[in-house]
Amino acid sequence: MIQRPRFWLMKTEPEVFSFDDLMRAPRQTTCWEGVRNYQARNMMRDDFKIGDEVLVYHSNATPPGVAGVARVVREAYPDPAALDPDSEYFDEKSGAHGESRWVMVDIQAVAPAQKLVSLDVIRNTAGLEDMLLVKRGQRLSIQPVTLAEWQIVCRLCGLA
DNA sequence: GCCAACGTTGGC
DNA sequence: GCCAACGTTGGC
């Protein structure tokens, strides 16, 4: 029996979709389309459950960091963008049988960080040195987070 | 824009 | 199944 809820970190480029965009979305909810990495997909498909909590991380940003907290409100279902030739997330190998091999989940904002928790702060905070985020070369766009790490980051976010 | 690190592809 | 070439990620 796996402990619930579980905790995750999801990367997004704020120029594409920021935490503010999530706050402005209907019901502060969005589908998390465009994940095109098998490891990340498998975590969403197999391990994401309703009620799991998510750190929303801004990558390719100035500075990069955790911008807010969200929760999973819908478990994995097919990502239709993979089948859409007009989408930037189109995957021509996906639709051979009319079915997307990629999935997405829906997340709903819980709260924005009072102040963005930068990667630099995360690097320099005791207890966070094992986060995948700060490991060299770790690029996964979806990462598991431990309860202890979650609590520390939430405190840094002013959301403890 | 650079580039290290990693993932994917495809010829063999 | 190997592995070189290529593409992507993402901090800087």
Image: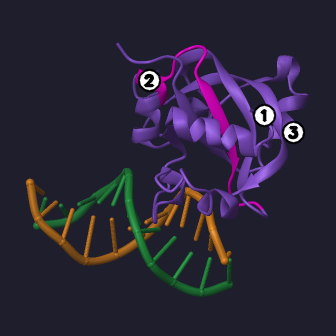
Chain colours: A purple, B green, C orange
Name the element at disc 3: helix
Q: Given this view, does label 1 or label 3 mark the residue nearer the observer?
A: 1
Residues at circles 2 and 3 in contact by the CB criterion of under 8 Å:
no
Q: Residue at x 66, y 37 (%)?
A: A55
Q: Does the magenta stretch include residue A60?
A: yes
Q: Residue at x 87, y 39 (%)?
A: A20
Q: Which residue carries the number 3 mark?
A: A20
Are the residues under marks 2 and 3 on the same chain? yes
Of label 1 and label 3, which has the lower sequence position? 3
Q: Which residue carries the number 1 mark?
A: A159
Residue C2 image-quadrant placement: bottom left
Q: What range of the chain is rendered magenta?
A: A44-61
Chain under disc 3:
A
Against C1, is A99 above or below? Answer: above
Label 3 is placed on what type of residue? Asp
Q: Which residue carries the number 2 mark?
A: A47
Label 2 is placed on what type of residue? Asp
Q: Is residue A99 magenta?
A: no
Using the image as rendered, state which of residue A125 and residue A52 is in the foreground: A125
| Residue A16 position in % (x across, y down) | 77, 47
Q: Which residue is drawn at 83% across and 23% down?
A: A28
Residue A120 seen in the figure: yes
Name the element at disc 1: loop
**For this view, does A35 lie left or right of residue A136?**
right
Name the element at disc 2: helix
Q: Residues under labels 2 and 3: Cα distance?
A: 26 Å
Q: Crowding near pointer 1: few (<14 within 10 Å), some, many (20+)?
A: some
Using the image as rendered, state which of residue A153 and residue A62 is in the foreground: A153
